Amino acid sequence: MEMLHADGIRKTFGNLEVLRGVSLTANKGDVISLIGGSGSGKSTFLRCLNCLEHPTGGEIRVDGEAIAFKPDGHGNREPASKAQMRRIRARLAMVFQSFNLWNHMTLLENVIEAPVHVLGVDRKQAVDEGLRLLERVGLYDKRDVYPAFLSGGQQQRGAIARALAVQPLAMLFDEPTSALDPELVGEVLRVIRELAEEGRTMILVTHEMSFARDVSNQVLFLHGGLVEEAGPPAEVFGNPKSERLARFLGSFH
């Protein structure tokens, strides 16, 4: 069952072509890791999937529904329907490397904000579900704490709970551990691993190679705005066909 499909995604910033035709299909329960060097286009591609960046070309389908684009008057495209965009964004929950929690809200308020104000969920129901999700990520006792008083790992687990609160079709993770101190990385990876074991559909940009190997069922290696190699993790990590991929993986040893 296809959750998310991207076909031939291109993205230019002025004269700089960052994505030159990247495609991906995520079926229900797939965990797809995007790996590659800095500047390879992986984070830009992830941001194109839910139109935080508007792709210059290509098609995106979410649960079979194509995102409609129109010319923006500057040689690029923008979503044609704000209502469709709001609906799509709620179905593709994004977890950023810098957490992006609202500092003026408690952790619980952060988690229930989108269900109440975007999806129209009854507040009591949203609170009950929010508390369950905070317990799920080990933060029930921090429910009334503001983000400034949480560690980076706690903030990121809170951001994962917030993403889960909209009951997304797929979750997008943009280097979710890169801003964390090394001793806090494990607690975030543990939560993501549990989500993978639950059968959640996820797409991760990550530098954690052993984690990508363990949790993914598909890995895409990006270089220069293109997918240079893709396949099951055992093949990509165990028998790289591209010399660039072999060099890239060698840099982690």
Image: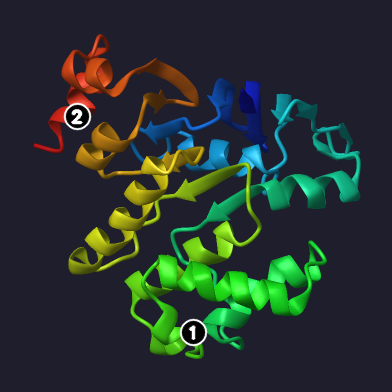
Q: Residue furthest top?
A: 241
Q: Is residue 31 left or right of residue 105?
A: left
* In the rendered image, the vertical position of residue 232 relative to residue 144, given as above or below: above
Query: 70 or 180: nearer the eye?
Result: 180
Report which residue position mark 1 lands on. Answer: 143
Q: Position of residue 242 (x, y in %)?
A: 27, 12
What residue lies at 70% left-to-right and 43% top-to-bottom?
A: 51
Reply above or below: 238 against 200: above
Q: Quadrant of residue 67?
A: top right
Q: Which residue type does callout 2 highlight?
A: Leu
Quadrant hosting residue 152: bottom left
- Of the residues shown, which amino acid type is indicated by label 1? Arg
Mark 2 burial class by Cα count in 10 Å: few <14, some 14-19, many 20+: some
x and y percentages locating residue 3 in the rendered image: 63, 30
User: Are there few (<14), some (14-19), or many (20+) residues within 10 Å of tag 1?
Assistant: some
Label 2 sits on residue: 249
Residue at (40, 66) in percent of width and height: 137
